[in-house]
Amino acid sequence: MRYLNELREGENVIEFYFCKLKQSMKSKAGKNYLSVVLQDKTGTVNAKVWDVSSKTQNFETGDFIKIDGLVQLYNGETQVILHRVRRALEGEYDESDYIPSTKKDIEEMWKEFIAYIDTFENTYIKKLTSAVFIDNEEVNKKFKKHTAAKSMHHNYLGGLLEHSLSVTQMCDMMAKHYTKANRDILVSCAMLHDVAKIKELSDFPNIDYTDSGELLGHLVMGCEMVGREADKIEGFPPELKNMMQHCILSHHGQLEYGSAKTPRTLEAMLLHYADDMDAYVKMFEDAVEADNTQGAWVGYHRVMERNLRKTQF
């Protein structure tokens, strides 16, 4: 298997990949071409079909395909010019080669994650988090292996758990440092903040937004989930439910970044910054890891809107 992160400029590649996206496009000169996104477990690479013919049309988005193409660099990024493409036959590929996955042990992360439930002193919060992560079969099954994003950060199998555990660990540390914060609210909402991503995004290998994800989003759906579970627990304090739901609704921080509300409590603000830090640090780390050029500078990162530099001494 020739993985996408191993491709080098100027080489011919004949290999099987997952077609993450196929689009029919038209050039400025009016010529039809195909824009394709290839995927394997190491990531994605853009590809183009300039000569559209019977040798290059027999596939669609979501297919495993066999390609014959030339690797080039375009604006500093790897792309493949496809000469021939066909839909792969059953038995010609192993799906595990095409699903990017966390490098960490999923079961070990899960054990560490749910262990936080026993640390909560508030019995209502303990019951709510147990109901969501232990008693709910759908969450228990999907949360461990789901992606945290379509493309931005932790966008691989186990990414949601890896990100959620990291944010939970940071919030636990923050609660020790910023002692005026309610530790149980902060840490429990760190566990819960992205739980609805199992409904917002479809499963591997063809990750995309579901109808609910497009129309509602994981902040609203997560808020609703917390509200439903709280309402099932006899005597659950309405003010506590409001505080937890607010943390979920506001964890993107700013309205222009998709937050339904801006953070209005200390716990909500700390959760937002922990979530933001983990996402941006991961994007930085991924950019450095994916860079195969010489020198200290990685180049311009579109999301962070800046040039990134490796730390080298």
Image (cartoon, rainbow, N blue to C red):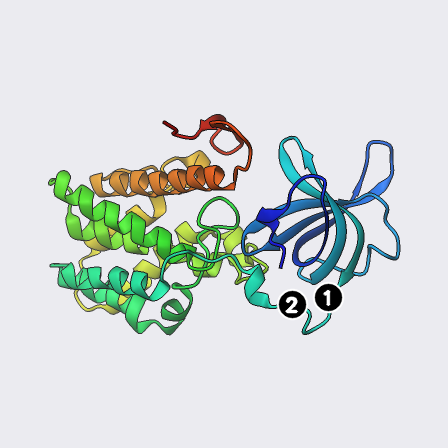
When the figure is inspected, residue 173 is found, relative to residue 93, above or below; the finding is: above
Residue, disc 2: 93
State left or right for residue 248 relative to residue 256: left
Residues packed near mark 2 inside 10 Å, few (<14), some (14 to 19) or many (20 plus): some
Q: Which residue occupies 31% across, 56% down? A: 192
When the figure is inspected, residue 255 is found, relative to residue 149, above or below; the finding is: above
> Which is more toward the observer, 108 or 223?
108
Image quarter where the C terminus lies is top left
Residue, disc 1: 88
Query: In the rendering, at what x and y percent does residue 55 appear?
Result: 86, 56
Query: In the rendering, at what x and y percent does residue 126 appear?
Result: 19, 63
Question: Contact (CB < 8 A) between labels 2 and 1?
Answer: yes
State left or right for residue 241 relative to residue 275: left
Q: Which residue occupies 46% across, 59% down? A: 157
Residues packed near mark 1 inside 10 Å, few (<14), some (14 to 19) or many (20 plus): some
Q: Is residue 239 visible?
A: no
> Which is more toward the observer, 289 or 54?
289
SS label for mark 1: loop
The kind of residue tagged 1 is Ala
The kind of residue tagged 2 is Tyr
Q: Is residue 146 visible?
A: yes
> Which is more toward the observer, 279 or 73?
73
> Which is more toward the observer, 264 or 139?
139
State left or right for residue 311 relative to residue 57: left
CA gap, disc 2 to disc 1? 8 Å
SS label for mark 2: loop
Q: Which residue occupies 33% across, 66% down? A: 107
Query: In the rendering, at what x and y percent does residue 172 appear?
Result: 20, 48
The mark that comes first in sequence, 2 or 1, is: 1
Q: Which residue occupies 67% across, 44% down? A: 46
